Image: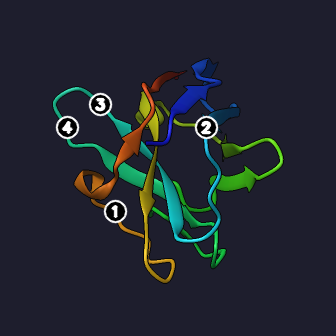
Amino acid sequence: QVQLKESGGGSVQAGGSLTLSCAVSEWNVEGECMAWFRQVPGKERQAIALISFEYGNLSYADSVKGRFAISQDSAKKTLYLRMDSLKPEDTAMYYCAARSCIRGYLDRYPARYQDWGQGTQVTVSS
C-alpha cells in the first residue's frame, strides 16, 4: 500500500496561487496513475487533475483547465498541483490518490483509486 501525504493548503485571496504537494512513499513509474481530487461538504469527490507516470498523459477537469497544472518529481517522490488564478469556488478539501492503471488510462472515479492521502484544505476568499 502506498502512503500519501498532502501539504501546501491554506487560505488565499481570489486571483492568488498555491502549490499543493503530495509525498509518495513508493514511486512506481510503470502502471501507476495519480490524481488530485477535491471535495466540498455535501458533494461528491471530483477528479480535477490526473497523470500517468508511464505514458505521461495528463487530464484536467474543465473547471480548472488552464489554471491548474499537475506535475511530478520522481527524485523527490512528490506529486504537485500548481493552482493559479484561484476562485472562491475552488475552496475545498484537496486529496491526492494513486491507483494501478493499464496503458495510462486516466480514471475519474474515486472508488477506483486504492490509495489516498488525508487531504489538505484550500480556502479562497473573494
Residue 102 in view? yes
- Number of residues whose C-alpha sits closer than 10 Å to that of mark 1, classed few (under 14), some (14–19) or many (20 or more): many
Query: Gap between marks 1 and 3, in whole Å?
Result: 17 Å
Q: Which residue is mark 4?
A: 43
Where is residue 1? Give x, y as percent.
Answer: 43, 42
Which of these two is toward me, 42 or 14? 42
- Which mark sits nearer the N-terminus, 1 or 3? 3
What amino acid is found at the position of numbered circle 2 in the picture?
Ser
Where is residue 80? Give x, y as percent.
Answer: 67, 44
Q: Secondary structure at mark 1?
A: loop
- Which mark sits nearer the N-terminus, 3 or 2? 2
> Which of the 4 quarters of the picture holds residue 24?
top right
Query: Gap between marks 3 and 2, in whole Å?
Result: 27 Å
Q: Residue at x 62, y 58 (%)?
A: 28
Q: Which residue is mark 3?
A: 40
Outermost left residue: 42
Q: Residue 25: which numbered mark, if any?
A: 2
Q: Residue at x 49, y 53 (%)?
A: 35
- Number of residues whose C-alpha sits closer than 10 Å to that of mark 2, classed few (under 14), some (14–19) or many (20 or more): few
What amino acid is found at the position of numbered circle 4 in the picture?
Lys
Q: Residue at x 69, y 31 (%)?
A: 16
Q: Which residue is mark 1?
A: 108
Which of these two is toward me, 84 or 94? 94
